[in-house]
Amino acid sequence: EIVMTQSPATLSVSPGERATLSCRASQSVSSNLAWYQQKPGQAPRLLIYGASSRATGIPVRFSGSGSGTEFTLTISSLQSEDFAVYYCQQYKDWSPLTFGGGTKVEIK
Amino acid sequence: QLQLQESGPGLVKPSETLSLTCTVSGVSISSTNFYWGWVRQPPGRGLEWIANIYSGGSAYYNPSLKSRVTISLHTSQVSLKLTSVTAADTAVYYCARLYTYCSGPCYDGFDIWGQGTMVTVSS
């Protein structure tokens, strides 16, 4: 099983500032990585697929980078609606598909 | 517009079988080449993938749940059965469409989700 580890668990950021979230895979997943945003009481929302491609309708302030085992999600200038929990997920190995434990982005 | 809607019993007793249904509207499941999946989230915790099924019927399961889970397709519904439930199966259960994006290499993402259905396992 590929273990996905996200850091930090909680990130305190002021509106307008940049947020950088990390995701590490226990073995290479190439670029088979997605990022999701989840707000309280809502389903996850796909932000990024293929490690760096924005999904439909996702603002340009969200960007993904990395390949292999190290990945980053960057939110260039945090808006009030961006405070949420973010998950990475690997698609390289379907046995099983695995998510990271999540990073909560909170208002500083 | 494609929409997913989960439904389930809400409360299930330990050792019983949980049956969930995801109703897909806006597209015919059998006429599209997509995977459909189930993901769950225990209260206050992270996401756990349960299973995927292709429109042609091929199914993939989380090995940790494989002995207890069955996913199936019926016209406009994606069903999930989980046997011998315990309190550890208490969670919000989501169904989602797995979309494959191809421009050169192909990559996946769960791009459309239902709103989720809460299932509590308790006597």
Image (spheres, rainbow, N blue to C red):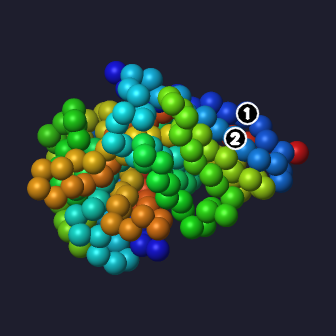
* Picture residue at 47% right of the left edge, 53% below the top: B58
Q: Are marks 1 and 2 in contact (CB under 8 Å)?
A: yes
Identify the chain of the residue marked 1, using the numbered disc in the image: B
**Do the residues indicated by labels 1 and 2 lie within the same chain of the protein?**
yes
Residue that carries the numbered disc 1 in the rendered image: B9
> What kind of residue is marked 2?
Ser
Q: Which mark is residue B51?
A: none
Q: Nearer the viewer, residue A5 or B31?
A: B31
In the rendered image, residue B3, in percent from the top left (x then y), is placed at: 42, 26
In the figure, is residue B9 to the left or right of B58? right
Task: Please state the chain letter of the residue tagged with numbered disc 2 in the rendered image.
Answer: B
Q: Residues within 10 Å of mark 1 (few under 14, many from 20)?
A: few
What is the residue that sits farthest to the left in this orientation? B104
User: Circle 2 sits in a helix, a strand or a loop, which is it?
Assistant: strand
Tell me the SS state at disc 1.
loop
**Of residues B54 and A42, the one drawn nearer to the viewer in this rendering:** B54
The answer to whether residue A18 is visible is no
The residue drawn where x is 27% and y is 48% is B100
**Pointer 2 residue:** B19
Rendered-image quadrant of the C terminus of chain B: top right
Q: Is residue B47 left or right of residue B1?
A: right
Q: Is residue B102 visible?
A: yes
Where in the figure is residue B11, as x and y percent of width and height? 77, 37
Is B12 located above or below residue A90 in the figure? above
Q: Which residue lies at the image location 11% right of the left edge and 56% below the top edge?
A: B104
Q: Nearer the viewer, residue A27 or B45?
A: A27
Mark closer to the chain start, 1 or 2: 1
- Identified by mark 1, the residue type is Pro
Q: Residue at x 35, y 62 (%)?
A: A90
Label count reads 2
